Amino acid sequence: MEKTVAFAVFILSFILMSLSCSSDGVGSYYTFLGTLEAKKKQSTEAIASFSQAAASRSAENRLYARYGLATVYADMGESQAALTLFEGIIKELSKEGSEPKGPEKELLYRSWYNRGLCFYALEDFNSATEAFRSALLVDGSRWNAKRNLELSLLAETKKRGSAASAGAVSTVKQNVPNPVLFDYIRQKEVDRWKSQQGKSSEESSIDY
């Protein structure tokens, strides 16, 4: 699975831009700090920093802070928590109905892409497929999304094949006669045959 967790450059470019045009330097600072901590795998510290940034006055800062939180949760294996955050980001970026551009378009792509990774980790390959397709609708040039889409489709096909094989094996087992019952029936047949043989001998013997 082609997994991209390194998002520091993307976040950093946003921070540098926002520091120059936003009065909310505190939110930008905590987003920057959380990014560095996440890159060092300091998950607890990164969560604390991104949570501080998520309380920012700037809606834009809050959005990127939530993205940072989601990626940390995903990296920790907390896929469900990450999925919830990514879903909220996607809804917020899509609520206006207009196509995002620039950094927001990149954020939308990455949110869809990372949702695909989370679904794949949960072995929900159908949902992973849909997420990667949505990512490609945002930016169809991304080879990693194309590759992961193919892998998700392949994994779903294998999963269905395994389920079908398991069902066939189960059916075969149910149709095999119970060996204990089979032995009992066979013994009854032997006893019945012996009984008939005994009667035949008695009937054919000469009565002196």
Image (spheres, grey):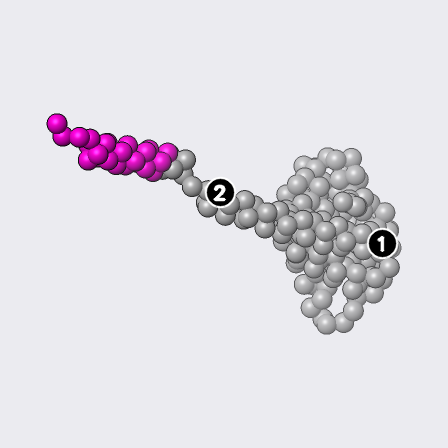
Of labels 2 and 1, earlier in sequence is: 1
Secondary structure of residue under mark 1 = helix
Question: Between residues 117 and 51, which one lies in front from this camera angle?
Answer: 117
Is residue 31 in view? yes
Q: Residue at x 76, y 45 (%)?
A: 1
Give the main secondary structure, helix, strand or loop, of the magenta stretch. helix
Tell which residue pokes out farthest to the bottom in this image: 97
Position of 70 compared to 19: left or right? left
Question: Between residues 142 and 49, which one lies in front from this camera angle?
Answer: 142
Instruction: State yes or no: residue 189 in magenta.
Output: yes
- Residue under label 2: 173
**Three-letter amino acid code at disc 2?**
Lys
Tell which residue pokes out farthest to the top in this image: 208
- Residue under label 1: 143
Secondary structure of residue under mark 2 = helix
Q: What stretch is highlighted in magenta?
A: 183-208
Image position, residue 58 (x, y; %): 73, 58
Q: Distance between the residues labelled 2 and 1?
A: 45 Å
**Three-letter amino acid code at disc 1?**
Trp
